[in-house]
Image (cartoon, rainbow, N blue to C red):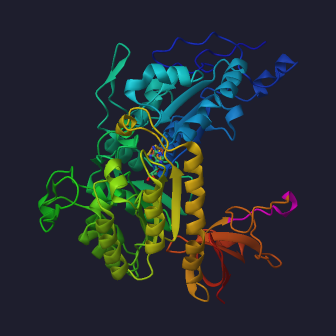
Amino acid sequence: MIERPPSRARSLPILEIAPPPATERRSGTEPDDARLGEFRPEPRALPRFYVWTLGCQMNRSDSEEMAGRLLTAGATESPTMDEADLVVINTCAIRELAEQKVIGRQGHLQRLKDANASMRVVLTGCAVRERDRDGLERRYPAVDLFLRPDEEPELLDRLGLASAQAPVGVVGATTVVGRTVVGVADHLATTRAAAVDAGTVQRTSSVSAWLPIIYGCDKTCTYCIVPFSRGPERSRPFDDIVAEARSIAASGFREVTLLGQNVNSYGHDLEPDPRFGHIRTERWAGRRLDLGSKPDLAELIRAIDGIRTSDGVPAIPRLRFITSHPWDLSDRLIDAMAECPSLCESLHLPVQSGDDEVLRRMGRQYTTEHYLERLERIRAAVPDITVSTDIIVGFCGETEAQFEKTLAFLELVRYDQVFAAAYSERPGTPATHLADDVPAADKRRRLNALLAVQEPIGLERNQRWLGREVEVLVETIARDRSHEHDESGTDGEGSVPRGVQPGPGQVALSGRTRGNKLVHLAGDATWVGSLVNVTIGHAGPYALRGTPVG
Ligand code: 5AD
Ligand code: SF4
């Protein structure tokens, strides 16, 4: 039996948590011959980690940052959860179902921990809210450490890994008093900038990059957990974002998506700066805001679009932003969308309901009339723009007639894509004071009715592209699943769709148009990451199919 130096074989200490009993690590078999000892690989000093990400793009971006920190500290990534010593779960709490997924894995995680005493589980993301610690421990018994989303920069510190290996730049500044965490991190922007400067953000794609520009949410939607889990809006400094965009461009990314829970309210909380003296707008919808001399999303888009190659074309050919609130869809933003060549002709603008009374109860603070006016303006300014939305069906008190108004709204607007969900009461949100009185069966029926209305609209919107030549950013090689007897149809992402027949030496590929339409095509595997011109020959309700030009 070979003694391992304790500093090397250490398990993960977690502050505030009793260290686990010292046990053998899972590390294969011992050599029979002691002389072979010197040829054994070095014992692993740092954990193999696995990040499980649920929910929205902001979570995916946060996970890239956490994975980067762990790798910089010397930890290695595990291909599966089962082989990891450290599992970081980045949760979503938007609907009960999202939380249930993680709760349902607690038994499995506990069994892994029983087999590997040095294993640790960290849970972060929107399911973690300060008020709720006891409830969290009950619901997630396999978890050792809970971190609110704004505490994620402290991951290494709290695991005792911060000084283990390489320097990791700025770490968090949260203070722990007894068992209570005080001093909510206002340092997300600083830690992001440090991670970007140090090149440690572990981007999962080499084609498309997430770029968070504003954290948190100041809106008043009564159903939504995000303002409670992610706190108030905090914009990153303008120059930091442009610097990150510049480094993304230099690394050859083809697409950048600016992220924020309310991306288009960017900048209102920043200090006025004479450089932005030409910005004199006030927000005129929702809560009044003085936006004078502060940068806004339009200014940011123009600055990023202005990063050009020596030929004068945008260094990042595709720029997107999500998610927008109708309050903040300013004329300045619409003008920037119309004038900046890199900005993609696509907008996600959640409406949530087509009935003004339901919108009022939801606290959305706009009317369908205001929403339609904004949409008309943007459609006039950006021809061919594709528009998608989010809808909640069965919100508290929603009558059949009010639901019918949502269906009529979809018929009127003719969205390219609709993401619909049944209302799910979230503890702690203002809507818990309203009765969740639409029966589950009615919610389900309304959801199906809505999808039945939207499907032909989606098909019609896609058919507008038939015969046209579009630019596709090729993202993935589709897997051949023909042997799996997949009956699910033609439009799924990731598997070879019916109708795409790769020739000799070709593969089935998928990508997106500037309008964010999914396109399947056959072509060369080396096209992944390239912009390819494609003639659209087939349109389904959820995807297009085409042939490369030339
Ligand atoms: N129940 C159902 N859907 C919700 N969403 C947000 N909160 C809830 C909830 N409590 C939806 C909204 C939002 C999207 C991200 O999730 O439509 O736009
Ligand atoms: Fe989920 Fe919303 Fe949080 Fe994103 S912001 S992780 S969708 S709850």
Give x and y (percent) for residue 343. 40, 72
Query: In this rendering, would 137 be left or right of 369?
Result: right
Give x and y (percent) for residue 10. 60, 18
Q: Is residue 483 magenta?
A: yes
Q: In the image, is residue 198 above or below residue 341? A: above
The quadrant in which the C terminus is found is bottom right
Q: Residue at x 42, y 32 (%)?
A: 148
Give x and y (percent) for residue 187. 31, 38
In this view of the protein, which residue sits in the foreground, 341 or 543?
543
Asked if residue 160 can be seen in this view, the reply is: no
Q: Residue at x 59, y 35 (%)?
A: 100
Give x and y (percent) for residue 215. 35, 46
Q: Residue at x 44, y 22 (%)?
A: 133
Magenta-tinted stretch: 477-484
Q: Image quadrant of residue 6?
A: top right
Q: Is residue 241 magenta?
A: no
In this view of the protein, which residue sits in the foreground, 373 or 504?
373
Q: Image quadrant of residue 147?
A: top left
